[in-house]
């Protein structure tokens, strides 16, 4: 060994280190952690799977949709919060929308136009319009007002593009009636799809909506897009509908909500939350 050139000795030492680290970090450590997890936390280590009638119906830590084939909410079930993961709760596309509070302008679809793939142009909703549309839909489903600040009555972002001689309701395509008739003495027009309003001043309009009846988690997606929980406020909002659809007493449904509510982490972090899948399965058992 001493007679080997120094560069050979260095490569041999590096190879030995590689082999040792491969065995330790690639074999021993994974086997050890897997064994401990299976022995002490078997259910969690295997995905916190939930079974019903001998079939796996989901996971307690992964949200899912409770809609029909067309994506409409099934009224007898509590609904999860929105998801931006793929087409919704797609385990292979876990993600957020990555849109922020300044994303307030829609790209309106141009009639007759096609996208790069040859499909009809569907435009693009801003984050604000997504929130407004969801709030309107939830309000209609639950029988409450879906109004919220910076939203129009027809469920889009209340945003103007202001020019010296006119103003345009940027997210309301013609022939829609603008949510306000005038702004600072200027007549407000509906937006013409395909027209460039980039030079106009962007003015979001708060409106006179008070505290929203629809909770924030009912209109916004989680960072992962796979959140299995909703807020207690959102569960309470849905309780009357679910009770009516199932012919159950409202108090009984609210008792089930309480039984499937988890407290704050370590007693002080976060907010209490309701596991939607577990709650819906409990309802199916009644």
Image (spheres, rainbow, N blue to C red):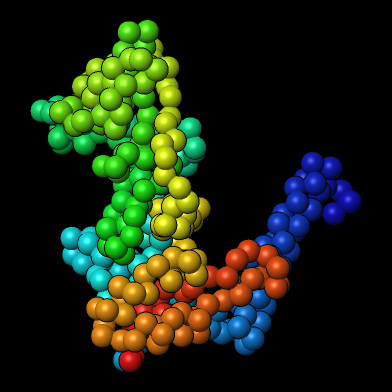
Q: Is residue 219 visible?
A: yes
**Residue drawn at point x = 33 percent, y = 91 percent:** 286
Tell me if residue 235 comes above or below residue 260 in the rendering: above
Where residue 109 sits: x, y (%)? 21, 31
Where residue 160 sits: x, y (%)? 36, 24
Quadrant of the image occupied by residue 156: top left
Quarter of the figure with the N terminus? bottom right
Q: Is residue 58 left or right of residue 7?
A: left
Tell me if residue 175 comes above or below residue 75 in the rendering: above
Tell me if residue 217 comes above or below residue 257 in the rendering: above
Instruction: Kindly give the residue lying farthest to the left in the view shown.
Output: 112
Where residue 158 sits: x, y (%)? 36, 34
**Residue drawn at point x = 28 percent, y = 21 percent:** 188
Where residue 46 sits: x, y (%)? 50, 79
Instruction: Kindly give the residue lying farthest to the top in the view shown.
Output: 164
**Residue drawn at point x = 80 percent, y = 46 percent:** 10
- Judge by depth and name the residue closer to the eye, 273 or 95: 273
**Residue drawn at point x = 19 percent, y = 31 percent:** 176
């Amino acid at each position: 060994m001493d007679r080997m050139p120094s560069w050979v000795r260095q490569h041999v030492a590096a190879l030995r280190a590689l082999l040792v680290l491969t065995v330790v970090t690639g074999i021993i450590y994974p086997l050890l952690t897997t064994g401990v997890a299976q022995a002490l936390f078997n259910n969690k280590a295997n995905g916190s799977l939930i079974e019903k009638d001998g079939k796996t119906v989901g996971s307690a830590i992964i949200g899912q949709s409770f809609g029909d084939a067309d994506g409409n909410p099934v009224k007898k079930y509590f609904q999860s919060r929105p998801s931006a993961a793929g087409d919704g709760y797609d385990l292979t596309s876990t993600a957020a929308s990555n849109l922020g509070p300044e994303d307030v302008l829609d790209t309106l679809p141009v009639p007759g136009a096609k996208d790069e793939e040859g499909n009809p142009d569907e435009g693009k909703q801003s984050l604000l319009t997504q929130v407004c549309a969801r709030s309107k839909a939830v309000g209609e489903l639950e029988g409450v007002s879906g109004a919220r600040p910076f939203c129009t009555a027809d469920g889009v972002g209340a945003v103007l593009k202001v020019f010296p001689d006119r103003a345009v309701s940027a997210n309301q395509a013609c022939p829609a009636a603008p949510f306000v008739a005038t702004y600072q003495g200027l007549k407000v027009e509906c937006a013409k799809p395909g027209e460039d309003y980039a030079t106009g001043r962007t003015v979001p309009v708060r409106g006179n909506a008070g505290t929203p009846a629809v909770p924030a988690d009912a209109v916004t997606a989680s960072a992962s897009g796979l959140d299995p929980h909703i807020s207690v406020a959102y569960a309470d909002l849905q309780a009357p509908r679910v009770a009516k659809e199932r012919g159950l007493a409202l108090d009984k449904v609210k008792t089930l909500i309480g039984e499937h509510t988890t407290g704050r982490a370590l007693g002080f972090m976060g907010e209490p939350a309701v596991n939607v899948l577990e709650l819906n399965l409990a309802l199916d058992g009644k």
